[in-house]
Image: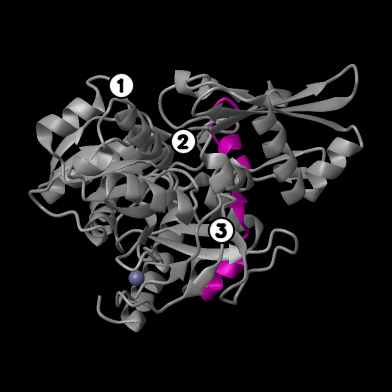
Amino acid sequence: MKSRKELERTIDKRIRWVVEYAYKHSPYYHKLFKERGLTPSDIKGREDLKKIPITTKKELIEGQPPKGDFSFFSRDPKNRKIFRFYTSGTKGLPKILALSEQELDLVIEISKRAFEMAGIRRGDVVLNCYPIGINASGMLTVLTFASMGVEQISAGVSPFPPKLSLIKTHKPRAMTALTSYADRLAREISLQGVDPSTLGIEVIVVAGEASTRKKRERIAEEFNAEVYNLYGTTEGRMPLAMECSEHNLHVMEDGNYLMLYDPKTGDFIENEGEKGVDVMTTLNYVGKGLGTPLINYSHGDTFEFISDKCGCGSIFRVISDVWRADDAIVISGAKIDPAEIEAVLHEPGNFKKLTGEWEMLVDFDEEERVYDLLLRIEARGKPEEELGEKVKRELMELNYPLANETSMGRIRFRVEVVGRGGLELYKVPGKPKRISDKRKS
Ligand SMILES: [Zn+2]
């Protein structure tokens, strides 16, 4: 694809096809279209998607057992569902998504493009540390690397064999990992007396969690590598967006088409530079089916469109860093964003004494009708109580509703400093569950 115009024509064609396919084969979308008096011929391209209501993970979960009958899965007998993936369910129930044999080629085409943007090439030795299992990212990365002719070590997140010994033995030029995992690995390697920057890793593709540019730059510095951010979801099946050589996040618009809307008004957002919540439509080659076609599906992730021009010459639109719905939490009306916590912990004065790792426990005291909010942070050395007080103060300065609810006695907010390795999240492999919300259990 050479021009933006050509790309847009391709997107429109694929949208028409996916709408037709979903209408025919997805019980959920067939019903939705009927209810709204819509037929596939009403949807000619990107603009017409705005006629279709937004679907969220609530409907997706209701459509799957135990409540539903997989009403989102296509019922196309000619197109086998070769994978059934589960989302990590970091907050709430996991979602179940099917991937069909007819969409594997597109998944690999787009994933390959993303890894090539990070400079990964045929013949490269790559250490793949994405969690490999029931989620989509690890498995599909394995298939993508295999088709690229990359020499991969599919290590996953298991502690054995230790990553340092794998790196020393195979000398990978590139590594893939969850952002928090790459960060933690650098620290673990340093603790073993080895400087991660001497290991020869040139490229790291981080994914799976919202991360600040600052955090990625620190990982880059620790490994002396280029770090590229990949935004992907199980629902999207492949990278939704990938960072280029200029470190701008480009949307892979021919794999999944993204729009934004304002959840307060329900209106779609047209302007660049205006923050909104994502709306995704899964695409495929015309004539090829999908396992779980999704039209105007919202993950609840927040970002903004920045521009459609970038120094790297790509024709794909650029978006800002993505804040994931899974990450934020609301307590007594106060919204707490992990980005705020990370900003305070990574503030140079604090970061000298803290590792930057944290976890949060939320509970509700039925007797006293008050929310308990416990933030646990990890110290590099001896845990000092004053450090906890300082972090608490700084967080409340940053978050007025939290400060207000705390002073009104509706939230009991405590910050506890623990020693190295003292966080609960270390006990569970995979995507770290930073927030445990006991109100739901
Ligand atoms: Zn670019």
Mark 1 C-beta closer than 8 Å to ligand 1 = no
Q: Which residue is mark 1?
A: 159
Q: Is residue 435 visible?
A: no
Q: Which numbered disc flags the more N-terminal residue, 1 or 3?
A: 1
Q: Are marks 1 and 3 in contact (CB under 8 Å)?
A: no
Total marks drawn? 3
Q: Please state which of the two labelled residues, at mark 2 or mark 1, is closer to the viewer.
A: 1
Region rendered in magenta: 47-69
Residue at 25 percent of width and 54 percent of height: 115
Quick check: which quadrant has ligand 1?
Answer: bottom left
- Name the residue carrying label 3: 278
Residue 344: x percent and y percent?
A: 61, 45
Q: Quadrant of the N terminus?
A: bottom left
Density class for disc 3 (Cα within 10 Å; few <14, some 14-19, many ≥20) is many
Mark closer to the chain start, 2 or 3: 2
Q: As drawn, is 51 to the left or to the right of 106?
A: right
**What amino acid does circle 3 point to?**
Asp
Q: Which mark is residue 407?
A: none
- The reply to whether the magenta stretch includes residue 136 is no
Residue 132, x across and y down, in percent:
31, 31
Instruction: Say the numbered circle drawn on residue 87.
Output: 2
- Pointer 2 with pointer 1, Cβ within 8 A: no
